[in-house]
Image (cartoon, coloured by chain):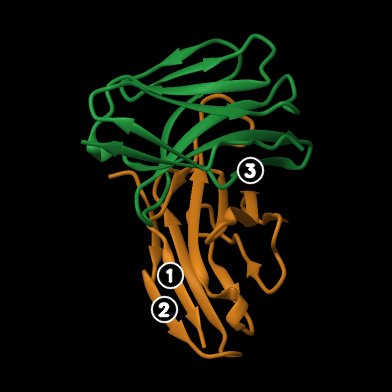
Amino acid sequence: EAQVTQNPRYLITVTGKKLTVTCSQNMNHEYMSWYRQDPGLGLRQIYYSMNVEVTDKGDVPEGYKVSRKEKRNFPLILESPSPNQTSLYFCASSLNYRAWGSSPLHFGNGTRLTVT
Amino acid sequence: DAKTTQPTSMDCAEGRAANLPCNHSTISGNEYVYWYRQIHSQGPQYIIHGLKNNETNEMASLIITEDRKSSTLILPHATLRDTAVYYCIVRVNRDTGNQFYFGTGTSLTVIP
């Protein structure tokens, strides 16, 4: 089944303890992206990647890192989490950033992160 | 960058058509309009997209005005399971790639 898989679904951690949220897709998509969702703010893009070894900042990249060493995986890294990073996170992928009209985003089921 | 404006919330009677409007007055000529919905806190689900022409699929219809400054998503026969937050998104094309800009969406409640 074609899907985007995020892990873990729920994570509670403490301030400053490094963590990684994994994201994997099995659709051979070139484009991958991370969003965070907060009440009243909708979904905001953190980072995106157009292909392997190509990443760029979205609207709210501060406090986050990403890597794209292989096409299927796009982990989100919080080196020193803070309480303002408590949020619902979504990973998404799309076939090809050049295929403007034929490649919608496919979303994972989300990771709810709480930083105390 | 193109952004979208949607009403915060709407109600629709079950079995009736739900018409969800979206304004995207700063959209550029090659930017697509996408619609997604999100049920509870699940991952957003793709519904439909278009550039200039009206589009229809098994889920919905998309009506785009001739000047492309606004669009309307139509759910022809709304059911209780269509209660969700609906996002109208413009896919912005840049030399460095592209981004999907989500707003805060419209919370649609289908009433029995």
Circle number at residue B101: 3
Between B5 and A107, the one lying in front of the other is: B5
Q: Position of residue B89 (x, y in %)?
A: 58, 36
Height in image: A1 above or below A18? above
Label 1 and label 2 in one chain: yes
Subunit of label 3: B
The amino acid on which the numbered mark 3 sits, given as a three-letter code, is Tyr
Q: Position of residue B79 (x, y in %)?
A: 24, 32
The amino acid on which the numbered mark 2 sits, given as a three-letter code, is Leu
CA distance separating discs 2 and 3: 26 Å
Label 2 and label 3 in one chain: no
The N terminus of chain A lies in which quarter of the figure?
top left
The amino acid on which the numbered mark 1 sits, given as a three-letter code, is Arg
Q: How many marks?
A: 3
Under tag 1, what secondary structure? Answer: strand
**Colour of chain B as rendered:** green
The residue shown at (50%, 63%) is: A89
Height in image: B64 above or below B106? above
Which residue corresponds to mark 1? A112
* Chain displayed in orange: A
Label 3 and label 1 in one chain: no
Which residue corresponds to mark 2? A11
